[in-house]
Amino acid sequence: MTPPENPVDPESPPHDLESLTTESDAYSTLAPEGLVPRVFFGDGELRAGWSVLIFVLLGGFANYPGLFNYIVGTVFYLLHLTGKVEEFTASTVIFGDLSALLAIVGAAAMVAMLEQRSLLAYNLVGPRRALNFFSGFTSGFVALSALVGLLAWGGWMHFGPVALTGAAVFKFGVLWAVAFLLVGCYEEGYFRCFLQFTLSRGLNFWWALGTVCVVCARLHFHSRGNGIWGVYAAALLGLFPCLILQLRKTPRSGFWQAAWVTSTLFGYIHTSNNGESWIGVFAAALIGFVFCVSVRVTGSAWWAIGCHAAWDWAETFFYGTADSGNVTSVGHFLTASPVGNPLWSGGADGPEGSLLALGVILLLLAALIAIHGRRKSATPFAVEEAR
């Protein structure tokens, strides 16, 4: 069933719970009373926890390869599209993230079938989708360029010779654009599309707190270095605002509880990158929250996908810096290297490992709200009541 595409009137009042429930019913079929235990269904649809569990088992998470991820990965390996080479190149990123993207699309499609809703309902519908994507892409490139400019102005980044000329600029520019579009689709599809949508309809403060505590405990007992304190900082930063929402019994606060969880998880997955510092991991969690806000104010995840892709493209291809600790030796246009104290230069992490990145991300958030916030196009297809 294809969801409606009625644009949100900027002047209309926020959705109330009754209207949200009515719209949600368009994508779900009430479970027959007395036939299905309430442990699996609530308010006429599969409970969010079971949806997430099925999604993770099929699509994987972090270092756990889900069933679909294993199947697609095996096919790609047999076709010699992927291998054990760890070099950070456009081709390895393209096929690696294409494999992961196909796996989570398959997992989300399976859950969507069980929930009897459209696959696009996971924060991919809403008004002005193409415009929001290109707005996000422009914002991501401008924000990263501003960060690089600040680093160069302060003497914390040094530019070397131009690495590419002629047709090679266009060739690698396109290859990296495809690569990071896939990265944006995969990571935003996982966190800001499926998880954000699903958790928003079934998460309260206590479940959110429990999830964040499990993530932090997992890092404490099984991880060392690689910026784990960035995850702790993100978890702590979201604790008190979400607790206030709980104490005030704020209606439809589930979206913000979900944003706390998905942003913390987004920082968590970056701890596995080589060269990540706590600032870089915290910056990843912080920009993950910005992407959640973009879903809230634009009505879909398209702004986040565009911004994510452009940020990474500018880092890796255009300026030739490290990207979350990953450095490519081929296919970058400019050449840049950090200079001086890693707290300011970013060090091996790249520009997002600099303290300046936090300020740039906050400015990006302010610009997002200033431009899109007045439209009040909150996620129209999720029931955001805290349960």
Image: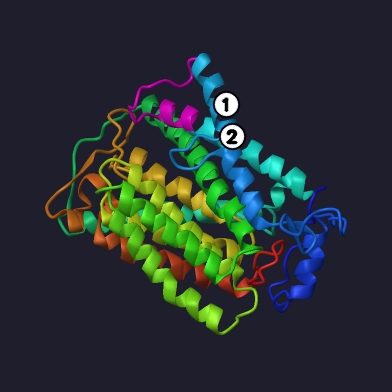
Q: Amino acid at mark 2?
A: Ala
Residue highlighted by disc 2:
103
Q: Is residue 270 visible?
A: yes
Residue at 14% x, 49% y is 339
Above or below: residue 175 compared with residue 13: above
Q: What span is colored magenta in the figure? A: 80-96
Nearer-N-terminus badge (2/1): 1
Residue highlighted by disc 1:
72
In this rendered view, identify the residue nearer to me: 105 or 215: 215
Q: Residue 225 at x, y = what percent?
A: 24, 49
Q: Residue 24 at x, y = what percent?
A: 77, 61
Q: Is residue 290 visible?
A: no
Compute the Cα span from label 2 to label 1: 7 Å
Contact? badges 2 and 1 (CB < 8 Å) = yes
Query: What number of labels is visible?
Result: 2
Residue at 38% x, 51% y is 218
Q: Residue furthest bottom?
A: 248
Where does the C terminus fall, quadrant-wise?
bottom right
Q: Residues within 10 Å of mark 1 (few under 14, many from 20)?
A: some
- The magenta stretch spans residue 87: yes
Q: Amino acid at mark 1?
A: Val
Residue at 51% x, 55% y is 136
Q: Residue 147 at x, y = what percent?
A: 30, 57
Q: Residue 94 at x, y = what percent?
A: 47, 30
In this rendered view, identify the residue nearer to me: 20 or 296: 20
Q: Is residue 85 left or right of residue 48?
A: left
- Say which quarter of the image contains residue 377: bottom right
